[in-house]
């Protein structure tokens, strides 16, 4: 293989870039705004979120259902449709010319970026493939416009890419229902990575799979990510997946980030009360004490609580938590927490 | 497609009977190319002869051979049904897919037009058209009018499917990938609704042919062109049943009933084929 040598150089260059920021999200606010019979309703699904994803990094985003994970990445990828709109803040990709926010880019700029630079493995990706079209047609429909070249060259490229992912080229002639769930997932990932994008967003990529297939698929994602040297924003509620995959991990609650740290550190020394409970709720081998759940339920984002959104359920909540919204403060290198009750993160409650 | 047809022929008795009936009618229509007589001429043979070997379906009081005249009549009637079905399918597909996918004011506008067409009474309007157009009413004009009136039900059906397709992941992926509305409708949604369109085509043909026969029997169409309804109209004009010339009416009626039953069975078996559970049950693979 002659292509090995340049590839390795490429990889070395990418390692040098690792500290560089691939995606910078600043104070992003994305609300669902509806108006029915004159009654306006606003759901603050993402409300002031800031984080950075570095080059060649797997960045995990965790949170329970309705915490705003999917809304956040829809806003980041500029894949919103009404009633979801970006109300404030920016999400800037390194590869975007002039480093403009994606939601300000024109349609033609978006078309030029998508798939080639920014790829999106959608939630429920089991049904990304059209059930009445052969897999080959889905590749042609979605990806060929971004690669250019003629049909034959595209087919060669698809075959090479499938080979890279250790998939049989026969899947191209199959209909989606003829493939197993794990196979369909792998084909979907192949479809999303065929243009070797700089940045991949994956929304719950393995949720419907059993753990064995899950591990295979995750290994494949990690291999292709390492091979391409791209950044991966991985969104799932499954902390096991994050522990396995993510370099850094952020926890979301009620539309805001509550904590962000390197993954091992987040699991070993969580700071925020919510993260602590989340980690404590994970089963551990050899420990058969019952896990204590947290009373209450996630906030209604149409009418979020005042101050810290976690305070109604927080065992450490004080007066200040009811009045003020905590911001993310660095408590250690690569470790940020949004809580008044954490020492070194904005005083006491 | 071919394997689908093979499966249907093997496992589905309705489809087999329907295919045979429609096939016979189609062969009959094809024979018109070999006819020794012109369909527009009268008194070519001795009138009022009962069925014999030389004239298998007998002859009419107007001196036409019933068998050969019938080949032209069924050809025109069949062609009429197909033209109406194709034109109205184009309309209902375009309107149904666009309305379901676009939603909003496009949907509201198209569906209010659609509902208007569903509620207006067809028969008086067709008669009205006949009285307005009179001599200019050829079967082409009638076919276009019927197509313009006959798309609404199926457009609603297709819209309801398009509504659900709009929220599937492959549609979102297509949008993310930068496909235009036209590309999404034609490449992603159209293949999905095609089986439904096939099934409704048969029903639409039955509907349009039935209305055409009714109009012709009553004389509200271009009666000089040979059609099934036109033949019955002329037989009634010559009081064929009173005169004992039953074969003039019996054979067109038998042929059109064969076509109706055949198309109906095809539609039923297609409907069943679209639902995979009933298909598997019939093939003996699935349980209850």
Image (tube, coloured by chain):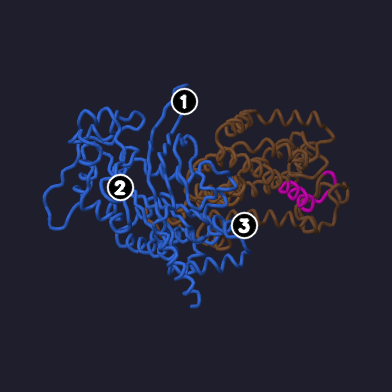
Chain colours: A blue, B brown
Residue beneath label 3, please? Answer: B20
Distance CA(mark 1)–CA(mark 3): 56 Å
- The answer to if B58 sits in the magenta stretch is no
Task: Determine which residue is flagged by label 2.
Answer: A260
Query: Looking at the image, do the residues carrying marks 2 and 1 touch, with CB atoms under 8 Å apart?
Result: no
From this viewpoint, which residue is outermost toward the top?
A: A38
> Disc 1 sits on a residue from what chain?
A
Q: Is residue B237 left or right of residue B277?
A: right
Mark 2 vs mark 3, foreground winner is: 2
Q: Nearer the viewer, mark 2 or mark 1?
A: 2
Task: Write down the chain letter for disc 2.
Answer: A
In three-dimensional space, the C-alpha distance between marks 2 and 1, rounded to whole angstroms, equals 38 Å
Which sits in the foreground, B137 or A240?
Answer: A240
Q: Position of residue B118 (x, y in %)?
A: 61, 31
Give the residue displayed 50% in from the left and 47% down from the top: B172
Tag 1, which secondary structure? Answer: strand
Residue at x 43% of width, y 37% of height: A30
Specify start and end residues of the magenta stretch as a single range.
B61-79
Is disc 1 in the same subunit as disc 3?
Answer: no
Q: How many marks?
A: 3
Q: Marks 2 and 3, how far apart in space?
A: 71 Å
Quadrant of the image occupied by residue A319? top left
The local secondary structure at tag 3 comes to helix
């Amino acid at each position: 293989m002659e292509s090995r040598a340049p590839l390795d150089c490429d990889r070395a260059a990418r390692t040098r870039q690792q500290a560089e920021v691939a995606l910078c999200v600043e104070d992003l606010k994305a609300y669902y705004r509806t108006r029915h019979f004159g009654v306006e309703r606003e759901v603050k699904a993402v409300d002031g979120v800031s984080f950075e994803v570095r080059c060649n990094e797997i960045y995990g985003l965790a949170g329970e259902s309705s915490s705003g994970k999917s809304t956040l990445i829809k806003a980041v990828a500029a894949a919103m449709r009404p009633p979801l709109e970006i109300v404030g803040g920016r999400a800037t990709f390194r590869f975007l010319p002039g480093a403009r926010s994606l939601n300000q880019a024109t349609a033609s700029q978006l078309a030029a970026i998508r798939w080639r630079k920014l790829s999106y493995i959608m939630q429920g990706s089991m049904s990304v493939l059209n059930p009445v079209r052969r897999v080959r047609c889905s590749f042609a429909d979605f990806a060929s416009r971004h690669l250019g070249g003629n049909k034959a060259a595209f087919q060669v490229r698809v075959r090479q890419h499938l080979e890279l992912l250790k998939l049989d080229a026969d899947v191209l002639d199959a209909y989606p229902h003829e493939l197993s769930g794990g196979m369909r997932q792998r084909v979907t990932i192949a479809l999303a990575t065929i243009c070797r994008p700089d940045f991949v967003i994956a929304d719950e990529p393995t949720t419907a799979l059993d753990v064995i297939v899950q591990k295979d698929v995750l290994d494949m994602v990690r291999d292709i990510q390492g091979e391409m040297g791209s950044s991966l924003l991985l969104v799932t509620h499954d902390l096991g997946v994050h522990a396995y995959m993510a370099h850094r991990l952020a926890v979301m609650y009620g539309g805001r980030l509550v904590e962000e740290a390197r993954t091992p550190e987040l699991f070993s020394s969580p700071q925020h009360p919510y993260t602590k409970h989340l980690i404590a709720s994970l089963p551990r081998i050899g420990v058969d004490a019952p896990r204590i759940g947290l009373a209450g339920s996630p906030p209604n984002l149409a009418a979020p609580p005042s101050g810290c959104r976690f305070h109604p359920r927080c065992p450490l909540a004080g007066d200040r938590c009811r009045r003020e919204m905590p911001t993310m403060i660095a408590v250690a290198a690569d470790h940020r927490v949004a809580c008044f009750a954490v020492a070194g993160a904005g005083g006491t409650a | 497609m071919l394997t689908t047809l093979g499966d249907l022929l093997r496992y589905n008795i309705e489809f087999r009977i329907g295919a045979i009936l429609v096939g016979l009618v189609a062969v009959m229509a094809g024979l018109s190319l070999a006819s020794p007589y012109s369909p527009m001429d009268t008194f070519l043979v001795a009138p009022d002869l009962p069925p014999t070997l030389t004239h298998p379906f007998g002859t009419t009081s107007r001196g036409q051979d019933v068998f050969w005249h019938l080949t032209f009549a069924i050809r025109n009637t069949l062609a009429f049904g197909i033209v109406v079905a194709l034109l109205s399918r184009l309309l209902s597909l375009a309107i149904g897919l666009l309305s379901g996918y676009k939603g909003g004011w496009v949907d509201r506008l198209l569906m209010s037009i659609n509902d208007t067409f569903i509620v207006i009474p067809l028969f008086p309007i067709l008669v009205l058209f006949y009285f307005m157009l009179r001599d200019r009413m050829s079967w082409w004009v009638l076919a276009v009018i019927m197509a313009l009136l006959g798309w609404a039900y199926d457009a609603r059906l297709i819209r309801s499917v398009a509504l659900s397709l709009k929220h599937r992941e492959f549609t979102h992926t297509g949008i993310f990938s930068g496909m235009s509305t036209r590309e999404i409708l034609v490449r992603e949604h159209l293949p999905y609704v095609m089986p439904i369109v096939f099934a409704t085509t048969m029903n639409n043909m039955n509907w349009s042919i039935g209305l055409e026969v009714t109009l012709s029997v009553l004389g509200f169409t271009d009666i000089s062109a040979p059609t099934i309804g036109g033949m019955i109209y002329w037989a009634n004009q010559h009081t064929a049943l009173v005169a004992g010339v039953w074969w003039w009416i019996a054979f067109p009626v038998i042929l059109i009933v064969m076509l109706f039953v055949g198309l109906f069975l095809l539609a039923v078996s297609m409907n069943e084929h679209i639902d995979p559970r009933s298909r598997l049950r019939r093939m003996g693979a699935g349980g209850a």
